[in-house]
C-alpha cells in the first residue's frame, strides 16, 4: 500500500477468532469514560468527526478524522469535540471471556 492509499476502515479487524471489532458512534458533546473493560487494549481508528482525549490530570488533546489512537492510562475519557457525529472503529484481541 502506498502512503496515499486509504485504509479500508470497514474491512479492518473484522470479527474473527482472534480479533474483535467495535464501532462506536459519539454524538456532538457525547463522552465515553475509558476503563479497563472498555477500550484499554484497543487500537482505535477515528473514521469521522473530531474527538478530544482527556487525561486524569485534566490535560486534553484533540484529534481529527484519520487519527489512529490508543487509550493507555492516564487517558480517562474520549469526548466528541466537534459539531458532527464521531465514528470510532476499535480493534482488540479477542479474549477467552469476550
Image (spheres, helix red, strand yellow):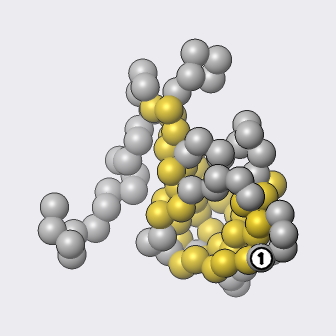
Give the number of marks: 1
Percent x, y of residue 24: 64, 53
Q: Quadrant of residue 79?
A: bottom right
Percent x, y of residue 31: 80, 64
Secondary-structure class at tag 1: loop
Is 16 situated left or right of 98 in this image? left
Q: Is residue 66 above or below residue 26?
A: below
| Mark 1 crowdedness (10 Å alpha carbons): few <14, some 14-19, many ≥20 | few
> Residue visible at 72% across and 60% down?
75
Q: Is residue 10 above or below residue 50?
A: above
Q: Residue furthest bottom?
A: 83
Percent x, y of residue 29: 80, 74
Q: Is residue 83 above or below residue 38?
A: below
> Residue visible at 83% across and 63% down?
56
> Residue visible at 53% across and 61% down?
69
Q: Is residue 69 visible?
A: yes
**Screen quadrant of the C terminus:** top right
- Tell which of 78 and 36 is nearer to you: 36
**Screen quadrant of the N terminus:** bottom left
> Residue visible at 64% across and 17% down?
97
Q: Residue furthest right?
A: 57
Q: Which residue is mark 1?
A: 59
Q: Is residue 95 above or below residue 21?
A: above
Q: Is residue 47 visible?
A: no
Amino acid at each position: 500500500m502506498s502512503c496515499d492509499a486509504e485504509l479500508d476502515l470497514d474491512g479492518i479487524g473484522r470479527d474473527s477468532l482472534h480479533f474483535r471489532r467495535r464501532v462506536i458512534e459519539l454524538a456532538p458533546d457525547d463522552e465515553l469514560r475509558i476503563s479497563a473493560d472498555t477500550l484499554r487494549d484497543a487500537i482505535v481508528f477515528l473514521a469521522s468527526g473530531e474527538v478530544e482525549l482527556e487525561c486524569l490530570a485534566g490535560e486534553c488533546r484533540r484529534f481529527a478524522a484519520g487519527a489512529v489512537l490508543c487509550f493507555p492510562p492516564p487517558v480517562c475519557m474520549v469526548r466528541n469535540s466537534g459539531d458532527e457525529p464521531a465514528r470510532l472503529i476499535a480493534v482488540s484481541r479477542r479474549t477467552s471471556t469476550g
